[in-house]
Image (cartoon, helix red, strand yellow):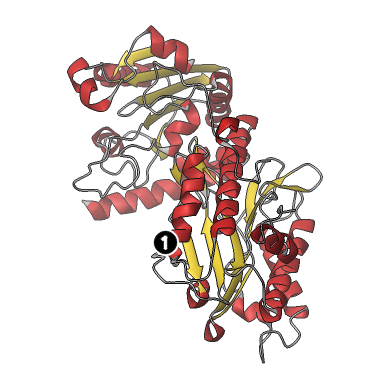
Amino acid sequence: MRFVFELLWALLWLGCGAAAAAAAAATQARPASAGPIGAWTPIPELPGMGRSVDTAAVAARRRALLQRIGRGSVLIPAAHERDVEKEYVQDNDFRQNNTFFYFTELETQDAWLLLTARGPDSLESVLFLPPRNPSQERWTGLRLGPDSVAVRLSGIPTVLPTDSLEHRLFAARLRVHGPIYVPLDVTTRDERRVMDLVFSGQDVHNLRPLADSLREVKDAEELARLRKAVDISVAGHITAMQAARPGMYEYEIEAVLEAGFRRNGADRVGYPSIVGSGPNSTTLHYDVNRRQTRDGDLVLVDAGAEWGQYTADVTRTWPVNGRFSSRQKAVYDLVLATQQVAFDSVRPGVTLRDLNRLAQTYMREHSGKLCGDQTCDAYFIHGLGHALGMDVHDVTVPGRLKLEPGMVITLEPGIYLAEEGLGVRIEDDVLVTPTGAEWLSAKAPRTTLEIERLMRGGVGR
Ligand SMILES: [Mn+2]
């Protein structure tokens, strides 16, 4: 059964991919009175001290999707609450499914979204919500129910109880010809309704490649969320640099860093924070953070806060004692110059692969004897960057990421000299603009001079 599913999944993915192709200042720790960077005005009727939905933005995304599809139906489930006893929930027991969030911005669980298009200009959106249950809400807090409040806050004109989904879907399938799209991924493989459809013999396609391709270019609302996540992350990095002293344990630095995130309104970390000192700076995804730092160590901190479903991804590498040795500075400056060269080439039409090649070439040609017998690019063992959004390694249609204005990518060259216990990575988040690029995370000190000045207690820049 699982094998059959995997096979179907792969076939649907491929089929839909082809269809898609065819269709195709807050740098200083702020005083408490200034309020956190991520502050928002809560909407009391929305679950989880809800943030308001940009109803115009999500409606535009639904229209964009239906325009790609032309004719057909789309069914998207929301995420469910996770089980603290089985799933090792470490932050919150609920985070919305990204595909559902993209088209609704609702943080409500167990919901479904049904879209039907009878042509590019005829779109019907229906939101299905479980009925409210007052005794359960004493445990879970307030929920959004199928009523006029949900209509008003979601901007979706029809909101029905989830038990009417089968009937409504059946009726829609009679009226609307064309395929039915459902997200087929790890989040839906245990979703009975989705699996029933897959095995129903109907014309079922995977929604993910289409939805993912829409997510590549961020709209203004997404950029606002990303900027907040980045600003919060930068504040956390700065707090960590300011607090660092030789002899601190990596987890102490992590604690200061993540306190900086949380204090500024982060929902959670976008991924496990990497605080690697000395030899650990050369382990790319080191995240146990248990070593005691020593005078003379470099500390590599790769960490990003998530805010409003969007995450930043920022890396800074700095000397725990606040002063780069000349050796550390030499390696650092080569990584920095490599990043700058890549940044200077970011513009619409360029691919990540082009940028990667440019960065590798620059590093190779400017290595001198810095990395011994080999040139330093031999120690730059990962890709230059990736898309950034709701996922830290955000969705991209494989192999064809030609940059367009509104895309957000990371630029993160590194050099990892394991024998020396010396690793340097510098990672910034960059918005592609019509004429080039904009640094989003530039407020985090980036040059050795800026870092040393900040760590001495002066201003960062
Ligand atoms: Mn990254």
Q: Residue furthest right?
A: 435
At x 65%, y 31%, the residue is 220
Q: x, y (%) of residue 357?
A: 70, 68
Amino acid type indicated by mark 1: Tyr
Q: Could you say which is closer to the camera, residue 425 or residue 342?
A: 425
Count of marks, rendered view: 1
For this view, does 257 lie left or right of residue 206? right
* Rendered image quadrant of residue 200: top left
Q: x, y (%) of residue 2?
A: 24, 52
For this view, does 309 lie left or right of residue 320? left
Q: Residue furthest bottom?
A: 373
> For ligand 1, which image quadrant applies?
bottom right
Mark yes or no: residue 390 visible.
Answer: no
Q: Could you say which is closer to the camera, residue 194 or residue 295?
A: 295
Task: Classify 80 as above or below 387.
Answer: above
Mark yes or no: residue 84 visible.
Answer: yes
Q: x, y (%) of residue 337?
A: 76, 67
Q: Residue furthest front?
A: 457
For this view, does 134 lie left or right of residue 313? left
At x 59%, y 56%, the residue is 242
Task: Classify 96 as above or below 130.
Answer: below
Q: x, y (%) of residue 83?
A: 22, 42
Q: Is mark 1 within 8 Å of ligand 1?
A: no
SS under mark 1: helix
At x 70%, y 44%, the residue is 404
Task: Classify 303 as above or below 211.
Answer: below
Circle 1 residue:
251
Q: Residues within 10 Å of mark 1 (few under 14, many from 20)?
A: some
Q: Residue furthest top?
A: 148
Task: Classify 3 as above or below 381.
Answer: above
